[in-house]
Amino acid sequence: MPRLLLVAVALAGAAGWGAIALHRGETISAAWLVLAAVGTYLVAYQVYGRFLATRVLGLDDRRATPAERLGNGRDFVPTTRWVLFGHHFAAIAGAGPLVGPVLCAQFGWLPGTLWIVFGVVFAGAVQDFVILFGSMRRDGRSLGRMAKEELGPLTGLLTMVAILAIMVILLAVLALVVVNALRDSPWGVFTLLCTIPIALLMGFWMKVWRPGATFEASAVGVVLLLAALVAGRWVAESPVWGPALTLDGETLAYAVIAYGFVASVLPVWMLLCPRDYLSTFMKIGTIVLLAAGILLVRPAIQLPAVTRFTDGSGPVFAGRLFPFAFITIACGAISGFHALVASGTTPKMVRREGDARLIGYGGMLMESFVAIMALCAAAALDPGVYFAINAPAAILGGTVESAAEVVRGWGFTLTPDTMRQLAADVGEGSLLSRTGGAPSLAVGMAQIFSGAFGRGMTALWYHFAIMFEALFILTTVDTGTRVGRFMFQELAGHLWAPLGRTSWYPGAVLASAMVVGGWGWFLVQGVRDPLGGINSLWPLFGISNQLLAAIALCVGTTFLVKGGKVKYAWVTLAPLAWVLTVTLTAGWQKIFAADPRLGFLAHAGQVAAQVASGALPAATGARLVFNDRLDALVAGAFLVVTVLVVAASAREWVLVARGRKAPRVTETPFTETAYAG
Amino acid sequence: MPADAPPPTTRLARLRAAARRLLGMPDYAAYVAHCRAHHPGRPVPDERAYFAEWVRARYGDGPTRCC
């Protein structure tokens, strides 16, 4: 980028931040937020990203990449950088960057905006870039394998167990988001049900009828999906089908569990591949559409910059601004899960080393941009409406009247008629207490889309947004369960060899059942939770994801220390220190805080007291107490594993830095590229 | 530059190839071209075997999708 253009971009970003800093009125246009964010990303990419690429990591275009050296036309394939950028972006950006910022909006729009923009520049994008680089220099090895090679077999094993546990929590919470969005929503259920036969049809099309015609089949799939979306209204209004597809949370939860199990044992070409293509198409298309919508409509941000709930009394989730804003927004600022993608398919496709900056650092900046757009969509809602959708029924009471009363008590305006009208506009029975973030995001997106691309279609846009979120969450459930199955089999193979053979059918079924049972259990408990489940599961997910980031940053720091770059180790040590501070504090509070809304153990104590006084049936009480203790145990286990990995890494760094241990570089030796300049 | 696949000739073909890679779709034709160029004399696996190997590489080796 020419220097003059960089200065212009910097000035535009500064203008955005200036408008944010100086605004004193009631509302501010979302355009300023977008301008500030994009300006910051471009400057960070040019300045900090370049510094990382040249000084810290020393990317070398003369060095042949794994795609070139090991090219096999299958998974090791040299790929043009913009195409790989799109592929990597589609793999890292799912529901996380959409849901986290929406939930975090309970603190106002400012804390989330600052964390998303500056977190990505100094933490998230650095992590993705360093891990992509490390894997690229090691023949595309996975994070677990690199942890084992750099830090020893025990640390490697701990990392693998942590990854499996995190997958289980991740799948449970994402499935819960879908269940909450589809509860009592026949239109949504119908559309999502249709994705299954559509995917099967695409699968047979590509495999049996017209082998290789993937593009054609995907295009037909998208058209059919949109037809199902339109037909959904008619189905929902039908006196027969409407009630039949109006399902409660528990029924939906068991349906999702059954689906996850079947999808993970079916051959991939039947269900998984076509869904993967469909959701990639929808994801990229909708994100482009959303960006266009925000630029066209430039919605006013209605939410206050900072709300009263920073003190920890918020209804969406418990806990103060520090540390909970920083674990609620994981994807978009820093997400440990990306380290798995950055050490998975992507490093095997990089054509030149220099491309890694665009793909690793740039790809994460793009995800951060998605998070900013999600935040804008939520913050453009009337604050009263936002809280009425996102606060659990136990706090709002079950009716629009009681909800309006409670929300007014928090100092926002809301009338029962507003909520009734809104529900009617989007074609739903009710929007009260639709926790999980997806419905409020869908309302926000529907307002933006219908403002930009045609009014009077709010209901259609709402269900389009719900379908879009549910589609790729279920794709994550598919792939995640399958991956969890393979990981489980690899771990179990150490105990009994036949279990490790992925082609042995009974082993595959058993491993799938274990993985589905794991996340399904948390899902069902989340659905039954009187506080809505998101309240306890989302923080658990945030903590586990950020702890995985800590492990990835430890591995990244080890690359630098052993590679003779100790003086630059701060680029990963600084985000590591921050992530550890935030997450250990949050984990500690979730386990031990005295407030029963926040601390798992305190909540168990409160339930026990309610049982003792006869306010709660003993069986329900026992179940809730067990859940609380299990959640506390899971959070505690995450903390312990992370502290162990950090301690083992720190020991290694000190040994190498003091010269007691030779800095053994595990990189594959240099080979000169055959590509012409 | 090693001849992995014959470069797509028309603009549409190039666009299609890029879209396939973007979605992570397997490309058997490119694979056959790769095998002929790099391993002459070795039999080229049929599409079924290729697809099975691709699935293992794509979904069997760690998470490929994030949250």
Image (spheres, helix red, strand yellow):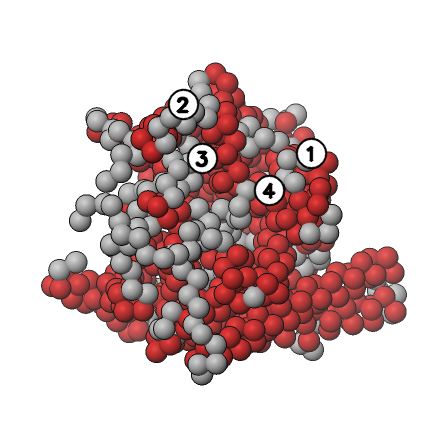
A202, above or below A52, in the image: above
Disc assigned to residue A482: 4
- Residue at 60%, 72% (x, y): give it: A644
- Residue at 60%, 26% (x, y): give it: A238
Please name the residue that numbered disc 1 is placed on: A505
Please name the residue that numbered disc 2 is placed on: A213
- Helix, strand, or loop for circle 3? helix
Farthest residue to the bottom: give it: A658
Identify which residue, A629 or A315, lies in the foreground.
Answer: A629
Query: Disc 4 residue type?
Result: Arg
Chain on which label 2 sits: A
Distance, label 2 to label 1, CA atoms, is 30 Å
Identify which residue, A117 or A268, lies in the foreground.
Answer: A268
Distance, label 3 to label 2, CA atoms, is 12 Å
Q: Residues within 10 Å of mark 2 (few under 14, many from 20)?
A: few
Query: Disc 2 residue type?
Result: Ala
CB atoms of marks 3 and 1 within 8 Å: no
Chain on which label 1 sits: A
Q: Position of residue A514 (x, y in %)?
A: 71, 46
Which is in the foreground here, disc 4 or disc 1? 1
Q: Position of residue A329 (x, y in %)?
A: 48, 62
A545, above or below A477, in the image: below
- Residue at 53%, 67% (x, y): give it: A151
Distance, label 4 to label 3, CA atoms, is 17 Å
CB atoms of marks 3 and 2 within 8 Å: no
* Residue A308 appears anywhere in the view: no
Q: Are marks 3 and 2 on the same chain?
A: yes
Disc assigned to residue A51: none
Please name the residue that numbered disc 3 is placed on: A277
